[in-house]
Image (cartoon, grey):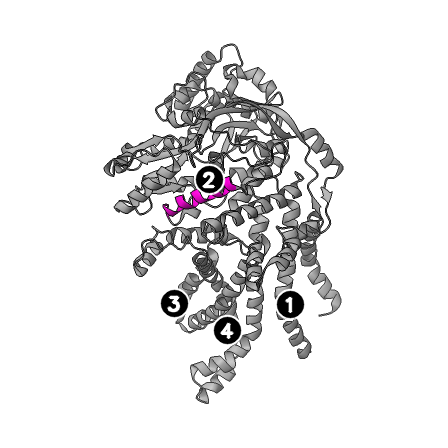
Amino acid sequence: MPHRTFFWFFFPSGLAMLLFIGLPIISSFFQSLHIEPEQILMEVEKCDPFGCKTETKVDIEATTKLQEEQPLGRFNGLGTYGDRNHLAFDEIKEAWTNSSSIAEFTDILLNLPFYKALLFTLTFCFAVTPPVVVLGFIVALSVNTITKSLKGPTIFGVILPMIVTPLIGSLVLFWMIDAKGILGSFIQYLFDDPNLSLKSSSQLTWITLIIYGIWHNTPFAFVVFYAALQTVPQDPLEAAIIDGASRYERVRHIVIPHLYPVATFIILICLMDNFRVLEPIIGFAAEGVAQSLSWMIYNDLRSENKMLFGSAGATSMLTIIGVAILLTPVLIRTWREFRTER
Amino acid sequence: MKKLLIALLFTFVSTSAYAGGHSPCGVTDGSIKILANEFTTYRIFMDEVKSCAGPDADFSVTHSVDHNKLQVAALSANPAEFSAKLVTNGSITTLMNDNLIRPLDDLVAKYGSALQDNQKIVIDGKIYAIAFMANAQHLWYRESILNDLGIAVPSTYEEVIAAAEKIKASGKMANPYAGAFKSGWNLGQEFVNMYLGHGGDFFKAGTAEVSVNNAKGVAALNMLKRLTEVSNPDFLTQDTNAVKEEWESGNVALMHVWNSGAASLLDDEGDQAIKADTRLANSPTVGGGSKPATTLWWDGFGIATNTSDANAEASFRALLGAATSTEMANANPNATIWLIDGYSPGDTAGPVVDAANRGATPYPSLPYMSLLHGALSTELVEFLQGNESAEKALADVEAAYVAKATEQGFL
């Protein structure tokens, strides 16, 4: 394709990306460098049904004036990035000098909100992605072999978890695994323990979330693999059959190599998606034990007080950096393959 | 025809009731959009607001348990998403901090002749909200179960735990106690109650500097831990509404929830045997203290700053009509404690009145209290799961609060 044609072909989506992805990122970055202006407090008399007393209140006039002078807030540089709710440099330094063993240091580290969230996010990413790829591949292979008349309904059934809105899907499962729900009571019956509850311990909640993640993401891998399976060349497969290759050998030596680039693509998308995990945490009411980076952003913007744009912006930037680091190995690999093909 | 009849009847009733002032009901212009919490008493109140607004009014109400999380974003927009918000002494401060609700003195002067003085929430000389009910959390118990086992009604939390353990040991119930321990606002509120019951102060006097990591805080946390041990193992996912469902399913014999819960717990739906067995008791004290471990709340409404004057007036009129409706209050005497003139309290009001008499504190209306409440919401979970010491959990609460309060400009 000539460069000129490519440019005009790419221009509309490039423009949309710049407007709706590029600019918001830049704006979040600027916001993350600022914190709210100082709140000026005053003592006033406050009367309610329980009586009158003197209480502290924000001096609205003075604070509004400050806000108008600095609409972005006070400049804080990279201060927000280093505070306890983000990278927590001071706390880590202190923990490093004061802790007697690596285990103690890790304990302190993983107690800090950002690292706690990072640990869950990464665990979720790496526990969900490989099973999704493997399961998606197996399901695609199986669906590919069934008779034509059954294919339609089967594909619909397989894709269903992806069609269900994540929040709804997780809420449905949340009630099913409740101690009195159908799955919850079955598990209690199975292990003969009336106090067993999937929602009560961190580990079990994590496992539930991961299983949900696999359930929800497998259809995506299936769809992509299934489409790619239709492009597997028939000639080598027929030749292999004539040579007496078993089904396993055909899959191992012809189908898998053919689908390799597709698998890379799926891993890339899955890692990216799972790094942003949010809905199942809300749906399963798991905020207490499983927090992800996206949940931290959500919590900054939807807590019971003023929205903490600076803090949310900083976490967003760190998330973007996280995604970039995570994808680098895959991207380098793709780039190398691209170079050798040329 | 029926609508017309109701409207006519209403005009008649309201004109007679508000002789002397302008009648608030029968709104014809301006739109009324209200954001409110979700529980039965608010539903009763909103039905009255709607009928006061009249059939010609452009009226909508959004009930959500997440109202506190929505309010700042929704009312900051200009024009605001809602023209009015039902507020409490807890949620009003966040709206006041950002100047999101307007003074109501003009509207009160025009329409508010039927208001009682204690309904007016006056801050620095201006009326910012109109209260219509008072609420508090207190103990509820199943009379037959306590009687069968010869347990006296607990008056301290130590007795609550002893009673729960006795019920558990008898095999009647596996998890006899329930409280709203859902991680988030509810969990924070449980700590607030327990800490105040121990006589604690959240901040160093007159400053935004937090101080909860002390002996009283540790004692409060340990008490919460012991309560969760006699609760459903899913306690971290149960909010007030879930606890009420547990109660109505007969799984719980003791619980500490809102007085307004009577509206749904004592209605004609659900298991009538459990309803007949349900009793209200005073909120317990804890750790030898004299104040009950609970907080006093008022519920009222505020009008958005960022809405047109016509919408503000329309919303104020409709809400005021309900907030001064003696008929509604006396038709639902047990739904809550109405602050409305002419209301005669039902038989469920006792525990709230008792809490007020014994010196329970109102929930602190400090501008930075919601930040501390937020920190409590998330940082106490690990302690309750047994993965962290009480001191460590409280140190985490303080550190999380300091980071957020610094970013908001309070420190």
Mark 3: which secondary structure? Answer: helix
Chain designation of label 2: B
Q: Is residue A46 above or below residue B247?
A: above
Residue A328, disc: 1
Looking at the picture, which amino acid does disc 3 mark?
Leu
Residue B190, disc: 2
Residue B51, disc: none
Pointer 1 with pointer 3, Cβ within 8 A? no
Q: Which quarter of the rendering shows the C terminus of chain A?
A: bottom right
Crowdedness near tag 3: few (<14), some (14–19) or many (≥20) residues, C-alpha within 10 Å: few
Chain designation of label 1: A
Q: Is residue B151 visible?
A: yes
Q: Which residue is mark 3?
A: A150
Could you tell me how far apart the alpha carbons at marks 1 and 3 are, in whole angstroms?
41 Å
Could you tell me how far apart the alpha carbons at marks 2 and 3 are, in whole angstroms?
55 Å
Residue numbers of the magenta segment: B215-232
Mark 1: which secondary structure? Answer: helix
Give the camera-side residue of B182 and B305.
B182
Q: Is residue B338 left or right of residue B100?
A: left
Name the N-terminal-most of marks 1 and 3: 3
